[in-house]
Image (cartoon, rainbow, N blue to C red):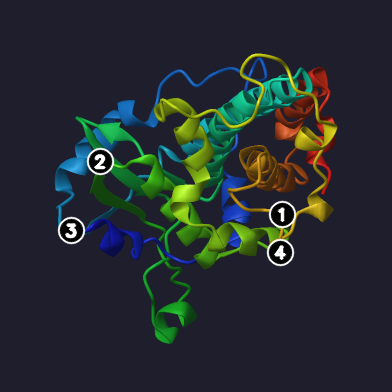
Amino acid sequence: MSFDTHLGRIDKRKWESIKSNWYSYLSIIDPPGTAPNYEISDSILLREEINNVKDSGEFKCDLVEIRKDIFREGIFLLHKAANVTGVTYSSATNGFLSWSNSSAYQSSFFAVKSIFCFCGMTFPKINGIDYLVDIWPQTEPISNNQLKKGIQPIQKTKILKFKNLNHYQYWRIFQRLLTIMDISIWNDDLVELLKIINPLDFGKQRNSLHYQNNYWLLTDLFQKMYDDSFSEIKISDINISNFEVSVSNFSVVLSRIIFLLAFLLVNDINQNAPILNDEVALIVRSLRNFGCDSYLEI
């Protein structure tokens, strides 16, 4: 089955519903910031279920045990994104402007994977094959008579076999999520900017730095360059005229946006879940240690 067909099978969803669902699956992380003991791909129950997944379709099952693990994975990915966001800021403010775009891309990638988790999706690789595990897909429709009898829709887990995903495809999945997700806490203008980016542009600066042998972005290859505007970005100043891949700090600005979107999700859950207080505080402290806690300002 083609990538585009499977992409269209990622269901619409509402953040308020997902947020309510999460409250039953949160657990204390002690000490705060501790890495999960295992990856989602190590789940024995998941490995049993994927045997039922066909190449041409999707499979739904009653796999609820991994819900808390997916949220935990999202939290740790956000910690990683916070660290690399700080490294990006530190690199830029210490004169390494070009290479800060490389770090910025990695921050964006960690942050977007955490967004997937908070929205109920993860992409484990099992036996060399990438799967989508979606714990909050649309429920199966039920009749009015069933509702009158008190029967509620059953929340299944959906599994799709994507085979081998590359970074370009992950960004297309992100843009699909931006299109189908109703998240009122996100800035609509920023979301629209992300939706219209050429998916190749998410990684263009990083890929050029890494793989184009005769390329360097700026003139800081042999001596440091200093430009406060490179990393001191105000969200309110970002618009379609200055947010394009030809701008030298595009990847840095992109990472600022995606990290903020990810943080807003976990912080929104935290408003009614003090069990997450220490995790959120640790993320803020990580940025403060690098001097860029202003990156959490909208």
Q: Nearer the viewer, residue 100 or 6?
A: 100
Quadrant of image for the N terminus: bottom left
Q: Which residue is mark 4?
A: 189
Amino acid at circle 1: Asn
Q: Which residue is mark 3?
A: 1
The answer to which image quadrant residue 31 occupies is top right
Question: How many angstroms separate mark 3 from mark 2 (CA)?
Answer: 12 Å
Q: Is residue 149 visible?
A: yes
Q: Residues within 10 Å of mark 2 (few under 14, many from 20)?
A: few
Q: Is residue 146 above or below residue 206?
A: below
In screen coordinates, is 9 left or right of 127? right
Q: Nearer the viewer, residue 248 or 196?
A: 248
Q: Secondary structure at mark 4?
A: helix
In screen coordinates, is 120 left or right of 127? right
Amino acid at circle 2: Asn
In screen coordinates, is 170 left or right of 23? left
Percent position of residue 17, x then y: 59, 61
Q: Which residue is mark 1?
A: 242
Q: Nearer the viewer, residue 239 or 143?
A: 239
Question: How many angstroms separate mark 4 from mark 2 (CA)?
Answer: 32 Å
Q: Secondary structure at mark 2?
A: loop
Q: Is residue 154 above or below residue 283?
A: below
Amino acid at circle 3: Met
